[in-house]
Image (spheres, grey):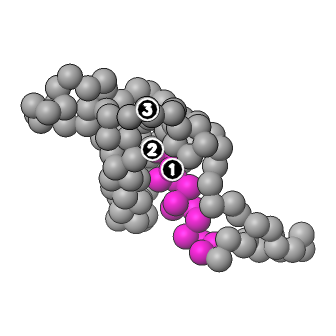
Amino acid sequence: MAWPPTLDELKVDMKIDLTDTRDDERLTQVLDAAVDYVERVRPELQYDTTDPEQLDLPEPTRDHRLGTLRLAARWHLRRRSPDGMINMAELGQSRVTTYDNDIDRLLRIGRHQRMRVG
């Protein structure tokens, strides 16, 4: 499976019509940032098949791909609540957490990270 995830994959996951290009620049920006983040926090995976140092590493799984897409979507949606609060009209305000256990589990980061020895 080719790395990194594409803008079209992100749009499909977010249920955005592929012909809708209004937010493409912003979506590309958050997807690129999510890809960079995942590559930085999970350096033990093979992201570049042309890099001889990465050839013996395992490829990112579908979990990593979906986690990266969901992380990008979360960052895109969170831009509306930089202070961690969101207005819900007559229901008042609600807190938006800065993390998502499902994304952490998919990417094996945060408290779902595997223990490393050495």
Query: What residue is drawn where x is 55% and y is 70%?
Result: 79
Q: Tell me, yes or no, whether the two marked residues, 2 and 3, touch with CB atoms within 8 Å.
A: no
| Amino acid residing under circle 3 | Val
Q: Quadrant of the N terminus?
A: top left
Q: Relative to 25, is 68 above or below?
A: above
- Per the rendering, the mark at residue 117 is 3
Q: Tell me, yes or no, whether the two marked residues, 1 and 2, touch with CB atoms within 8 Å.
A: yes
- Residue 20 or residue 72, whichever sits in front: 72
Left or right, 96 with respect to 113, comes to right
For the residue labelled by badge 1, is the local secondary structure a helix, a strand or a loop? helix
* Residue 6 visible from this viewpoint: no
> Percent position (x, y) of residue 44?
32, 34
Q: Relative to 68, is 94 above or below?
A: below
| Amino acid residing under circle 2 | Thr
- Residue 117 or residue 43, whichever sits in front: 117
* Residue 22 visible from this viewpoint: yes
Which residue is tagged 1?
A: 71
Q: In which quarter of the image is residue 49?
A: top left
Which residue is tagged 2?
A: 68
Residue bounds of the magenta highlight: 69-82
- Residue 47 or residue 92, whichever sits in front: 47
Query: What residue is drawn where x is 41% and y is 60%?
Result: 30
Left or right, 19 with respect to 4, comes to right
- Residue 111 or residue 50, whichever sits in front: 111
Query: What residue is drawn where x is 44% and y is 27%?
Result: 62
